[in-house]
Image: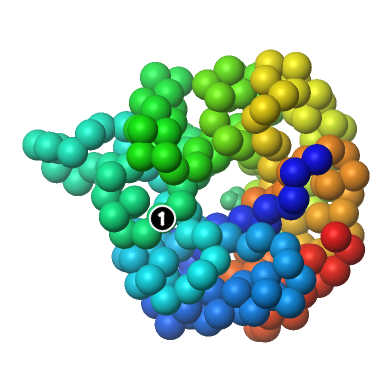
């Protein structure tokens, strides 16, 4: 099993923008240094460049388009996020769904820039399709639990188990993350014990009064 990744998506929460994004990144970097666990954050595009420049932790985009540089207006290219300092990107998040062809184009664009691709999926079937595209990670998140405060680790551990199995069957080199409602060290430990390579989460950290305390708890059982 590879070392765990804790990936915190700041989404477009107002509690995850500007100075608050910097405060979360400061806490994430501190806990990563204390614990030795890799903690990455996915800020908005606006905050991506300053955060990537100010902090040592890995920074991800929340979405990337598959188009290359050139005459495309309003697209966010893999080249652009790389120049801004990103290590990789989420692709096909539940809140930013793409077609299969678009997912493939985004993954190929990331890989051409040697950036990490995290394809999000909502069930075992899409996890299998995602794994066939050979990203670095597939992140399984049951949409009904996203932002619910109910942890996938506790409410639906079976989907984690089945997704790990299906991804491993399609390509054992593809890592598996899980997310939705992850909020404590116990949730992370269950996810790890079920065979994942880490977790993808948002609200429990971004909306916390003290993100530092939540982040310390998240790594406490690893
Ligand atoms: O990208 C992470 C996400 O969709 C899970 O959100 O708030 O349930 O941790 P949350």
Residue 210 coordinates in the image, percent (x, y): 67, 83
Q: In this orientation, does residue 180 appear?
A: no
Q: Using the image as rendered, state which of residue 216 and residue 159 is in the foreground.
A: 216
Q: Nearer the viewer, residue 99 or 27?
A: 27
Instruction: Give the quadrant of residue 124.
Output: top right
Q: Nearer the viewer, residue 205 or 164?
A: 164
Q: Is residue 208 left or right of residue 221?
A: left
At horizontal 69% and vertical 42% (from top left) the residue drawn is 177
How packed mark 1 is, by other alpha carbons closer than 10 Å (few <14, some 14-19, many 20 or more), is many
Given the current orientation, which residue lies at the most extreme left position? 71
Where is residue 144 drawn, in percent x and y? 68, 42
Picture layout, residue 164 above or below residue 43: above
> Which quarter shows the N terminus?
top right
Q: Position of residue 160 (x, y in %)?
A: 80, 35
- The location of residue 72, given as percent across then percent down, is 14, 37
Q: Give the total of numbered labels.
A: 1
Q: Secondary structure at mark 1?
A: loop
Q: Residue at x 52, y 60 (%)?
A: 58
Q: Is residue 31 shown above or below 90?
A: below
- Left or right of 137 in this view: 104: left
Residue 119 lies, with reference to residue 85, above or below; the image says above
* Residue at the spot 64% in from the left edge and 79% down from the top edge: 30
At a point 72% along the width and 71% down the height, the residue shown is 215
Q: Which of 34 and 185 lies nearest the eye of the viewer?
A: 34
Is 163 located above or below residue 84 in the figure? above
Coloring basis for residues: rainbow
Residue 103 figure quarter: top left
Q: Which residue is mark 1?
A: 86
């Amino acid at each position: 099993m590879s070392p765990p990744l804790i990936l915190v998506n700041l989404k477009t929460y107002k509690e995850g923008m500007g100075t608050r994004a910097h405060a979360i990144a400061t806490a994430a970097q501190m806990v990563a240094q204390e614990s030795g666990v890799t903690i990455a954050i996915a800020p908005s595009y606006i905050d991506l460049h300053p955060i990537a420049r100010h902090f040592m932790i890995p920074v991800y985009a929340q979405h990337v388009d598959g188009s290359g540089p050139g005459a495309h207006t309003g697209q966010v290219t893999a080249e652009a996020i790389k120049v801004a300092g990103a290590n990789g990107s989420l692709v096909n998040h539940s809140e930013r769904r793409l077609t299969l062809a678009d997912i493939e184009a985004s993954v190929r664009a990331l890989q051409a820039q040697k950036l990490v691709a995290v394809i999000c999926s909502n069930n075992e079937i899409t996890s299998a399709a995602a794994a066939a595209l050979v990203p670095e990670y597939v992140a399984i998140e049951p949409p009904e639990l996203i932002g619910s405060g109910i942890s996938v680790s506790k409410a639906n551990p079976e989907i984690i188990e089945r997704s790990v199995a299906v991804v491993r069957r399609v390509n054992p080199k593809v890592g598996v993350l899980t997310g939705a409602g992850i909020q404590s060290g116990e949730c992370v430990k269950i996810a790890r014990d079920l065979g994942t390579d880490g977790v993808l989460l948002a609200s429990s950290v971004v909306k916390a009064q003290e993100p530092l305390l939540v982040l310390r708890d998240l790594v406490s059982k690893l």
